[in-house]
Image: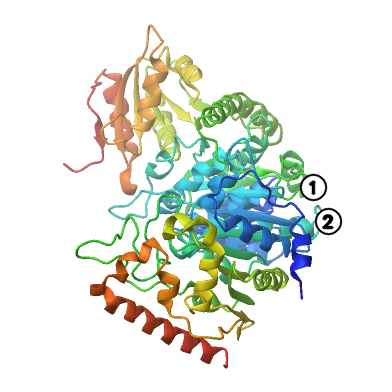
Amino acid sequence: MVTIKDLAKKLEEKKFVAGHRTCAGCGIPLIVRTVLAASSKPVVVAVATGCLEVTSTIYPYSSWNIPYIHNAFENAASTISGVETAYKVLRKKGKIKEEINFAAFGGDGGTYDIGFQALSGALERGHKFVYVLYDNEAYMNTGIQRSSATPFGASTTTAPAGKVHQGKEEWRKDITQIAVAHHIPYVAQASLSNLIDLYNKAEKAFNADGPAFLNILQPCTLGWSYPMEKTIEMAKLAVESKFWPLFEVENGVYKLSYKPSKDVPVSEFMKEQGRFKHLFKPENKKILEFIQKRTDEEWDRLLKLCGE
Amino acid sequence: MPEIKALTGDQAVAEAMKQINPDVVPAYPITPQTEIAMTFAKFVADGDVDTEMIRVESEHSAMSACVGASAAGARAMTATSSAGLALMWEIVGVASGLRLPIVMNVVNRALSAPINIHCDHSDSMGCRDLSWIQIYSEDAQEAYEHTILAVRLAENKKVLLPVMVMQDGFITSHSLENVEVLEDSKIKKFIGEYKPHKPLLDIKNPVTYGPLPLQNAYFEMKRQQIDAMENAHKIFLDIGEELSKITKRKYYYFEEYKTKDAKAVIVVLNSTAGTTKAVIDRMRQEGKKVGLLKIRLFRPFPYKEVANALKDIKFAAVLDRSDSFGANAPLYSEIKNSLYDLTKRPKLQNCIFGLGGRDISEDDIEKLFSDLLKGNVSDKVKFIGLNE
């Protein structure tokens, strides 16, 4: 098990460096650095169009000290499958000596929605790579539009809260369970607030014998509308309120990574975020209750899966 | 020794791919291309090649995986038709923009809607402005040889652009022909060992592929792409000459068939050139001065050379197997452009034919030649074989 000291040391290895233009308070760089730190071998990455891509490679600059490819929005998974297959052939031919790990990074738009098919195909084909989803729950790069990761009730620029509609009216897609349904060796949900847990999961993902999928909650100061210094706090509240459970599925076996010690209502997580502000009006009380009820039901279902 | 084999157009391409022995082939089935992927898959299954195939879940992922594999430093090839090419359209542009020497066989088929599985050129013409080199093939033999030539052209350091090799769906792809398959060792030598340019898998020298150049640099990068296309114009001939030494056949930008003293000429792509040749042979016996200009290289387009070939012709008909709906059809447009600087130029007749696989017969072509010889040329598009 890695300690916070070990992790700090590992993060000194500069695979992804300063100079990128993510927003103040953005958690994406920390996700990228923590995940990459967990690979004991050199890593080659493919990145989907999105916040990470536009902020890290504005020509002629690049924050990537490791081989990087951006192809398009919807195909990070199929791009890395081409890279990984090339590696397999060239290694067989003796043209590449080193062992290399592969990772693809995508936001929720590039993963839940437009890149869904490419992801499913790559997982099914069994390429050895880690798919890293930084899930900020909307199309943040283009200005906070609704995605299928957007939580129920959240106001976005394409499904805004108004006089008749109260933000998103559908429950989010459970992409983590969908990844599990591909019967790949490793799937996990993680959060920035539990960095050691994230690191350990990334390490397992890189060591898995086949595709691995990490879904990491990425609070977005701009899209969620909360003060920029509170990113880690938001991530923590998401976990404590069971809005974002931490668990892993290793070769089909579920394991809960963290059990909150006390009951924190989801409204505690929601109340400081501008995207949920409208739900705290007295007339929307029923929506909040519905969200709490459904969150509880999902938590109970997960506990059963984890044998708790 | 070269070997004569009975092969369809699709099988001939698969045979070329076997000799090329690419590192990675991502493929997805679509009629009438499927037989390329199927035939090649058997070569993989039998260990005749070292290739890793990726059985992707769509053509979009086929091209995406080609981009990944090619950037990684592998020789990557794929094949598609119609809707498949349309689905990968975005990534077709990425492949050329990233300057990746991917070779793709396109078995021409009409685009939907209405859905139709037969030949026309709307698919490859639809992406003629995506900075891919485009080579059109008359028959299985040409499709086979063009595929081999394409690899060298794409990978040339002064080019580094992807290449599309076309053949007519069903007409060529599913017809059995005698194909002269060249000696493995000669093709292997001609193709050579692949030396990738700045591969992603060179982990000691990390590169960022596909950054975000904005107003400051995008334009310059596109200018480099334009230059690369211009380089391809010359290098196509150099590589063609090298291939000629093995095949004893010529690879000029186009083939001139009995045009030297011709009064009337037909300009056309792909398999219809074969039909036209048969008609020319017959009409020539009757003393009629007719000829054919079969365009092989459509991108980069050989404007000056075409002008030179057509300058003394009185009447020419340009036959397009696709339209540009509201503008001049693709081939007609280029031929007309080529002639602009000439003081003396042929009168042109544009014809559209064969959409969705509608047959064009020797009689249709003979009638067209007869009209041309009579000077019967109109600025209105003639639709051959259309019921109206």
In this view, B116 is above or below B209: below
Of residues B305 and A56, the one nearer the viewer is A56
Locate residue B334, reporting x and y percent. Answer: 40, 25
In the displayed structure, does residue B284 sit left or right of residue A305? Answer: left
Location of the C terminus of chain B by quadrant is top left
Residue shown at the point (54%, 58%) measured from the top left: A229
Of circles 1 and 2, the one toward us is 1
Locate residue B340, reporting x and y percent. Answer: 38, 14
Identify the residue under disc 1: B204
Of residues A164 and B228, the one nearer the viewer is A164
Residue shown at the point (76%, 71%) measured from the top left: A3
Mark 2 Cα-neighbour bin, 10 Å: few <14, some 14–19, many ≥20: few
Residue shown at the point (40%, 75%) measured from the top left: A267
Residue shown at the point (59%, 37%) measured from the top left: A59
The secondary element bearing badge 2 is classed as: loop
Looking at the rendered structure, the kind of residue marked 2 is Lys
In this view, B373 is above or below A219: above
Asked if one can make out residue A190 in the rendered structure from this viewpoint, the answer is yes
The secondary element bearing badge 1 is classed as: loop
- Mark 2, chain letter? A
Looking at the rendered structure, the kind of residue marked 1 is Lys
Counting every numbered tag in the picture gives: 2
Identify the residue under disc 2: A97
